[in-house]
Image (tube, rainbow, N blue to C red):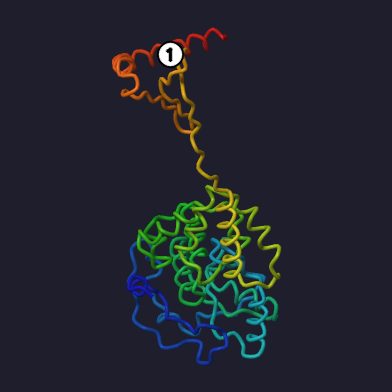
Amino acid sequence: MGASLMARNIFNQPPRNETESGAPSPTPPKAAKLPGSVGGLRDSLREITANSIRDIEPDQIDMDGLRDRLVLEDSSIDELAESIRKHGQQVPIMVRPSAQPDRYRIIYGRRRLAAIRKVGGTVKAIVRTLDDDASLVAQGQENNLRLDPSFIEKSIFIKEMQESGYKPGVIQDALGLTRQGVSNHRVVIEQLPDGLVQLIGPAHGIGRRQWGELAALSVKVDLVDIAKEALAALPDDTPSSEKFQAVYSACSSKARSDKKPPTRGLTSVINDENGSSLGTLTIDEKAIALKVTKKDNPEFGQWLEEHAEATLLQLFIQWRNKRGSGS
């Protein structure tokens, strides 16, 4: 974890998963100071006592905020639900009051909320009155600590934050990234076609370089069509990182096979009325080249050198006039 994230961290680092033992409210550190744009988070969890953790009915909580994970309802939700059924909810979620009475909007803890909805009963929640910026920072930081989102999940989160109008400083605080770090994520996601990431999934362990190389192939081949074909041959439970490798391999192979060999120029010899060579004319996909060897035709070569520009201009005017007349 980078120093910038530690400097902006607003809550204690919780256990990595619900099965870890220990009291739900560890001894908190000193309150961390935050930029003024997210001043609602200046209070640390030290000020949140047991009385501020409420039991709330899950159906009173609305799924709110931007998407920060590609996969929510997966097998891990069932595993988490079973752990909560056996050991109880060890770590609370965080919500904020909604504009509607007795309703709340989730800030973080979407997986825990989904698991408790499967188990039944109330959910333990910290209720904080935060504005949109502060809620986003809390969501991003908690996910970085607990879930370790993949490169492409962070990229999608950044894209959605920017498109929703959040300021650069808030986005950087939410993910603990520098301005350049945010730019590195955005550059890659902007090159990827719609739907490709959803086909592959979060692909943990696949970083910026690999996603960037796949994105670069989008100018050569149809990534989505190739991905669908490649993934159709894989078992449904294939990990998303392996899906990425299969898609990248298929797209790279297609790009190499589609690369056309260089076209060799077609060269013809131009002769005079007596059959003597005047020069050669070479035509390829890039240029038309006329070559006259001065050694064979020194006088003509000298004349052509003096009149080449005027002659080429005259031919151009002649072509333009014929095109304009429709002949």
The percent coordinates of residue 119 (x first, y second) are 69, 81
Residue 46 or residue 264, whichever sits in front: 264
Q: Secondary structure at mark 1?
A: helix
In the figure, residue 177 lies in which quadrant?
Answer: bottom left
The percent coordinates of residue 89 (x first, y second) are 59, 84
Relative side of 268 to 242, left or right: left
In the figure, residue 62 lies in which quadrant?
Answer: bottom right
Residue 296 or residue 314, whichever sits in front: 296
Residue 247 or residue 55, whichever sits in front: 247
Residue at numbered disc 1: 315
**Which amino acid does the dot numbered 1 rest on?**
Leu
Direction bottom: furthest residue: 22
The percent coordinates of residue 60 (x first, y second) are 64, 70
- Work out whether 186 lies above or below 295: below
Residue 209 or residue 46, whichever sits in front: 209
Residue at 40% across, 67% down: 40
Dot 1 crowding, Cα within 10 Å, few <14, some 14–19, many 20+: few
